[in-house]
Image (cartoon, grey):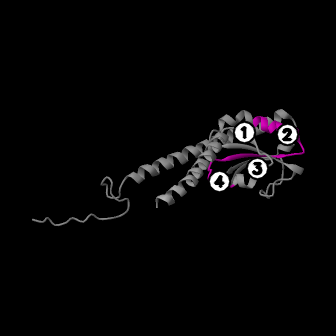
Amino acid sequence: EEDFRARMRPPRLEQMRSTAADAARRAAQRGAHTRLTAGDVLATFLSDPTDASPIILHLASGVDEDMVHWVEDTMRRMARDFPFARLVTEVCEGGRPPECLPFIRELPTVLVVERGVISSACSGLAAAREPDAVREVVGKWLQAEGVRLAAAAAEAARDEEGEQEEGAESYCGVPGCKTYFHEHVVGKKRG
């Protein structure tokens, strides 16, 4: 048994280190803007089951570099207002949306993705052709989404805190007793 434990210990330690490194990497990405590189897969990024933080995704058209820069600039400036979210840009080559998001018809667009589901979208950015107009539209949308996401995060924290408090209380009120319906049996005194 000792040999078995000795063989299992190094792989398990490596797995724990890898998990901790992934968590630290994800935490470092919150509240900051990044651009996905060629090696990153958008579909995997959006459906990561280990990270529940919302993703603010800028789907950019590779055709219009100026528009990409204007939206990214706004996202970088406002990133510190989103310590609970990841802000990401994906440049779509050929001006077409990625295959993992088939219902997106128009680029550029900015989306909020929560647990793999799109909860909000800012589209129509192509109509605003001036840098200040684009920055204003994206900035106002990000402010509104920041308020909504912060309220949702606060509500989730309150719910989680309430569940922890409820879980500590037993069904019968006796500290340390069971949390489901039960009866206490009183035994006879032996004499």
Residue denoted by label 1: 33
Q: CA distance from mark 4 to mark 1?
A: 19 Å
The disc label shown at residue 131, or none: none
Residue sitting at 41 percent across and 53 percent down? 167
Number of the front mark, 2 or 3: 3
Residue sitting at 59 percent across and 43 percent down? 151
Task: Residue 138: name its quadrant.
Answer: top right
Q: CA distance from mark 2 to mark 3?
A: 22 Å
Mark 2 or 3, nearer chain start: 3
Few, some or many C-alpha atoms within 10 Å of disc 1 (few <14, some 14-19, many ≥20)? many
**Residue kind at label 3, given as amino acid type:** Asp
Tell me residue 139's x, y (percent): 74, 36
Mark 3 or 1, nearer chain start: 1
Residue denoted by label 4: 115
Discs 4, 2 touching: Cβ within 8 Å: no
Residue sitting at 24 percent across and 66 percent down? 185
**Residue kind at label 2, given as amino acid type:** Met
Discs 1, 2 touching: Cβ within 8 Å: no
Image: 9 above or below 150: below
Tell me residue 4's x, y (percent): 51, 60
Q: Which residues are magenta?
A: 47-74
Tell me residue 109's x, y (percent): 79, 47
> Is residue 23 at least partly visible in the picture?
yes
**Residue kind at label 4, given as amino acid type:** Arg
Tell me residue 174's x, y (percent): 30, 54
Residue denoted by label 2: 67
The disc label shown at residue 40, or none: 3
Number of the front mark, 3 or 1: 3
Number of the front mark, 1 or 2: 1
Task: Indicate whether residue 51 is drawn in magenta.
Answer: yes
